[in-house]
Image (tube, grey):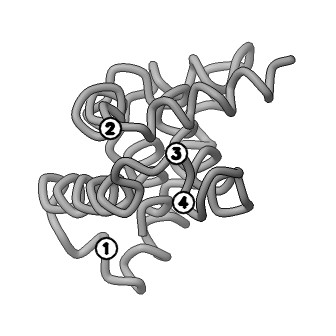
Amino acid sequence: MFLRGLRLELFVYGSMGNLKKICGPISTFQLWMAKILYGWEIRKATKKQGLYRHTRAEVTEMMKRDLRAVSKILGKKKYICGDEPCEDDCAIFGILSGPLWNLPGSVYETLINGEILANTLMNTLRQFIIVFFR
């Protein structure tokens, strides 16, 4: 559900400025068409799933609860399954990197940088960044 919420934030609720930062040098018309057409598909899919039937504040709260659940699962552990990273840790890194780099200034970026990743999850994320960008 978290990924669907991110898509809603980017293409339905978000501004054209965020899309422009992510998409790079494309024309305003192409950006507008992408937002309209892809936003329509996202609205349709999330309405079937049930997420779009809630208000933006409710969706944000649901996504915050998802992030808090991941944080509680990790707790004080270095990784999910022990001392060595596994595929689940990589999946969490991939999911959390979306709002960190694709939704600048959003409530999710603030939440991840502040409250959620204040524990060892931030250290895990930093270690993956170091390994990833070597």
- Whether residues under marks 4 and 2 lie with C-beta atoms below 8 angstroms apart, the answer is no
C-alpha gap between disc 3 and disc 4: 7 Å
Question: Alpha carbon of mark 3 to alpha carbon of mark 1: how far?
Answer: 32 Å
Looking at the rendered image, the disc whose residue lies closer to the viewer, 4 or 2, is 4
Q: Residue at x 30, y 31 (%)?
A: 118
Q: Residue furthest bottom?
A: 48
Q: Amino acid at mark 3?
A: Lys
Q: Which residue sits at x=42%, y=38%?
A: 120
Q: Which mark is residue 51?
A: 1
Task: Tell me if residue 49 comes above or below residue 72 in the rendering.
Answer: below
Marks 3, 1: nearer the viewer: 3
Element at label 3: loop
**Is tag 2's residue or tag 1's residue first in the polypeptide sequence?**
1
Q: Amino acid at mark 1?
A: Leu
- Give the residue type that dot 4 points to: Ile
Position of residue 106 measured from the top left corner of the image (x, y, whole percent): 32, 29
Label 4, label 1: how far apart the Cα atoms are: 28 Å
Residue at position x 47%, y 36% in the image: 99
Find out whether the residues at labels 4 and 1 contact each other: C-beta distance under 8 Å: no
- For label 1, the SS is loop
Task: Provide the residue designation for mark 2.
Answer: 108
Question: Residue 29 vs residue 6: left or right?
Answer: right
The residue tagged 4 is 80
Q: Earlier in the sequence, mark 3 or mark 1?
A: 1
Seen from the viewer's position, the closer of residues 90 and 95 is 90
The number of numbered discs placed on residues in the rendered structure image is 4
Q: Which numbered marker is on residue 7?
A: none
